[in-house]
Image (cartoon, helix red, strand yellow):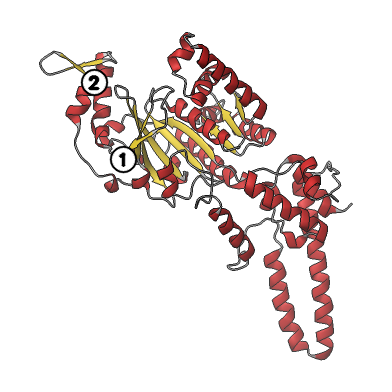
C-alpha cells in the first residue's frame, strides 16, 4: 500500500484535515505526488474552510486517483511517520558510518546532532514546536490574515469586534451567559445564520427546546422577519415568499444541522464526528453535565468543570470553535455584569473560555448588552457594546458603546419578579411607572475598563 496517497484519500473521503495535522503529519513526510496534493488541500481549506471533495480534487490535480482506505486517519498517519522515521534513521546511520571511518569524533558530533533533529521532527503526536521551524506555516498564515481583513479566525457579526480581536479562531471556546429570558437562544440562532452565510457548516445542539422551536427561531432570524408575524401566521404575501425562499436556500446548502442528541460528552463527540462541522453551537451546556452526573455522586460543579475542560480540549484537537450558553446566577444584581463571579455552575468556565460574554437585556427598549468579561488576545472593553435585539427584524444591529443603561437593569428585573408583574413596577408613591422610565432613573455612569477579569 502507498500509505502517503492512502492518507490523502482518507483525508479527502472524510473531509478531515484536522486529525492528520494533530497527529503530526508534515508535508516533508510525504512523497512528491502526495506533497503536491497536500498543498492543494491546505490551500483549498484556507480559502473555503473545507477539504475538497474527490471530484473537485480531480479537477485541481488531474492525476489524482481516489481510493478511500478502510483504515483510520490516525493509523495511516502513524504509518507515514514510521516510514519517514525509518528513512531518516537509515540515512543518518549511513552518513555516520562513512564519517566514522575517517574521524570518529566528527561522526559522534554529527550523530548527536542528527539524532536530536530526528527526535524533534518525528513525534507520536504534534506536541512540540521548535521556534523558527514553522517558517513556512507562519508566512502562509500571514497571507491568510491579509486576505481575511486582518483576522486570523472567522469573522464576528459585528465589525468593531473584528477590528479589536483576531476573530473566532478554530479551537476557541466561547461562552455566553445571562439570566433566564434574555434571548440567549435567539442570539445563538443569529450566530448560526451568520456563520452559515460565511459558508461554514454549523452543528447546533438543542437541549432546552425542541427541533421545531429552534427552527422557528432560525427562519425569521435569517430574513429579518418580525417574530410575531411568524408565530401568529400574520405573514404578508411578500413575507411568505421570502420565508419559502430562505427555507429552500437553507435546505439546498445543508449547512445548519440542528440536533437533540444527548448522551453527555460521548454523544456530543459522536455527533460532531458524524457531521464534521466547522462551528459547533450548544444552547445549554449544563445538560451535558447533567448527563455525566446521572447515576453517579458527582457534584454539579465538578461535572460542569469536567465538561468545560473536555470542550476546550476537544475544540483545540478538532480545530473548530465551540460556542455555548448558560445561566448567570443572581449575583448579577451585585456585580452588574462587571466580572465573572455571576457565572452559574463553575469558575472553570471563566478560566477555560477564550471569550466569556455576559448578556443583559432591556426588554422595554429591545436593547441587548454583550459585556465581554473575558476576551483572550483582544480588547474586551472595546468589544463591549449594545445591539438591537428586536425579534427578529433588526436583531444584531450595532447601537453603540454607551452602556450606562445596564446599571439599573437587574434591579428592575428583581422588582418585576418580586411583584410578579413583568410590565410595570411600582414607584415609591404607589403609582405605576413604566420599566423604560425606571431604566432612565437608574442611569449612572461607570467605566467598562475598570471591570475585573
**The one of 153 and 23 positioned closer to us in this rendering:** 153
Q: How crowded is mark 2: few (under 14 residues within 10 Å), some or many (20 or more)?
A: many
Residue at the extreme bottom? 102
Q: Mark 2 points at which residue?
A: 435
Query: Is residue 345 among the parts visible in the rendering?
Result: no
* Of pointers 1 and 2, the one earlier in the residue sequence: 1
In this picture, residue 377 sits left or right of residue 46: left
Residue at the extreme top? 233
Find numbered disc 1 in the image and state the secondary structure of the residue it sits on: loop
The percent position of residue 299, horizontal first and vertical second, equals: 47, 32
The quadrant where residue 130 appears? bottom right
In this picture, residue 97 sits left or right of residue 116: right
The percent position of residue 131, horizontal first and vertical second, equals: 58, 67
Q: Name the residue under label 1.
A: 401
Q: Do the residues labelled 1 and 2 touch (CB within 8 Å)?
A: no
Residue at the extreme left? 429
Query: Is residue 287 among the parts visible in the rendering?
Result: yes
- Is 142 drawn above or below residue 97 in the view shown? above
Q: Residue at x 56, y 16 (%)?
A: 241
The percent position of residue 376, horizontal first and vertical second, equals: 44, 50
On residue 367, the disc is none
Nearest to viewer (mark 1 / mark 2): 1
Q: Residue at x 38, y 27 (%)?
A: 389
The quadrant where residue 38 appears? bottom right
Q: How crowded is mark 1: few (under 14 residues within 10 Å), some or many (20 or more)?
A: some
**The one of 126 and 55 positioned closer to us in this rendering:** 55
The percent position of residue 309, horizontal first and vertical second, equals: 53, 42
Amino acid at each position: 500500500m502507498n500509505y502517503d496517497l492512502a492518507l490523502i484519500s482518507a483525508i479527502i473521503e472524510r473531509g478531515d484535515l484536522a486529525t492528520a495535522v494533530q497527529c503530526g503529519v508534515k508535508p516533508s513526510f510525504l512523497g512528491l505526488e502526495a506533497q503536491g496534493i497536500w498543498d492543494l488541500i491546505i490551500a483549498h481549506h484556507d480559502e473555503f474552510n473545507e477539504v475538497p471533495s474527490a471530484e473537485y480534487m480531480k479537477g485541481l490535480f488531474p492525476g489524482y486517483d481516489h481510493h478511500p482506505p478502510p483504515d483510520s486517519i490516525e493509523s495511516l498517519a502513524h504509518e507515514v511517520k514510521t516510514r519517514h522515521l525509518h528513512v531518516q534513521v537509515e540515512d543518518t546511520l549511513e552518513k555516520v558510518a562513512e564519517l566514522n571511518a575517517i574521524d570518529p569524533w566528527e561522526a559522534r558530533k554529527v550523530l548527536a546532532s542528527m539524532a536530536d533533529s530526528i527526535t524533534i521532527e518525528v513525534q507520536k503526536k504534534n506536541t512540540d514546536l521548535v521556534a523558527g521551524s514553522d517558517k513556512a506555516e507562519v508566512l502562509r498564515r500571514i497571507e491568510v490574515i491579509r486576505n481575511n481583513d486582518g483576522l486570523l479566525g472567522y469573522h464576528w457579526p459585528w465589525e468593531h469586534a473584528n477590528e479589536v480581536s483576531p476573530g473566532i479562531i478554530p479551537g476557541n471556546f466561547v461562552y455566553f451567559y445571562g439570566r433566564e429570558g434574555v434571548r440567549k437562544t435567539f442570539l445563538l440562532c443569529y450566530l448560526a445564520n451568520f456563520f452559515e452565510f460565511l459558508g461554514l457548516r454549523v452543528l447546533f445542539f438543542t437541549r432546552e427546546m425542541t427541533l421545531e422551536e429552534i427552527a422557528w427561531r432560525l427562519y425569521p432570524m435569517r430574513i429579518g422577519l418580525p417574530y410575531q408575524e411568524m408565530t401568529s401566521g400574520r405573514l404578508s404575501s411578500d413575507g411568505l415568499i421570502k420565508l419559502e425562499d430562505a427555507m429552500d436556500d437553507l435546505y439546498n446548502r445543508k449547512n445548519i444541522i440542528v440536533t437533540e442528541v444527548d448522551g453527555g460528552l460521548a454523544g456530543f463527540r459522536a455527533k460532531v464526528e458524524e457531521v464534521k462541522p466547522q462551528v459547533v453551537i450548544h444552547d445549554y451546556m449544563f445538560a451535558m453535565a447533567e448527563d455525566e452526573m446521572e447515576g453517579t455522586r458527582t457534584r454539579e460543579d465538578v461535572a460542569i468543570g469536567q465538561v468545560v475542560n473536555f470542550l476546550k480540549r476537544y475544540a483545540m484537537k478538532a480545530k473548530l470553535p465551540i460556542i455555548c450558553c448558560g445561566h448567570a446566577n443572581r449575583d448579577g444584581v451585585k456585580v452588574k455584569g462587571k466580572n465573572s463571579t455571576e457565572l452559574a455552575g463553575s469558575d472553570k468556565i471563566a478560566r477555560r473560555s477564550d471569550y466569556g460574554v455576559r448578556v443583559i437585556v432591556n426588554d422595554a427598549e429591545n436593547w441587548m448588552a454583550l459585556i465581554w468579561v473575558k476576551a483572550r488576545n483582544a480588547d474586551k472593553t472595546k468589544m463591549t457594546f449594545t445591539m438591537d435585539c428586536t425579534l427578529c427584524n433588526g436583531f444584531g444591529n450595532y447601537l453603540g458603546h454607551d452602556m450606562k443603561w445596564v446599571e439599573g437593569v437587574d434591579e428592575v428585573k428583581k422588582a418585576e419578579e418580586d411583584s410578579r408583574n413583568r410590565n410595570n413596577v411600582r414607584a415609591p408613591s404607589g403609582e405605576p411607572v413604566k420599566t423604560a422610565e425606571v431604566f432612565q432613573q437608574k442611569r449612572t455612569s461607570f467605566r467598562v475598563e475598570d471591570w475585573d477579569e
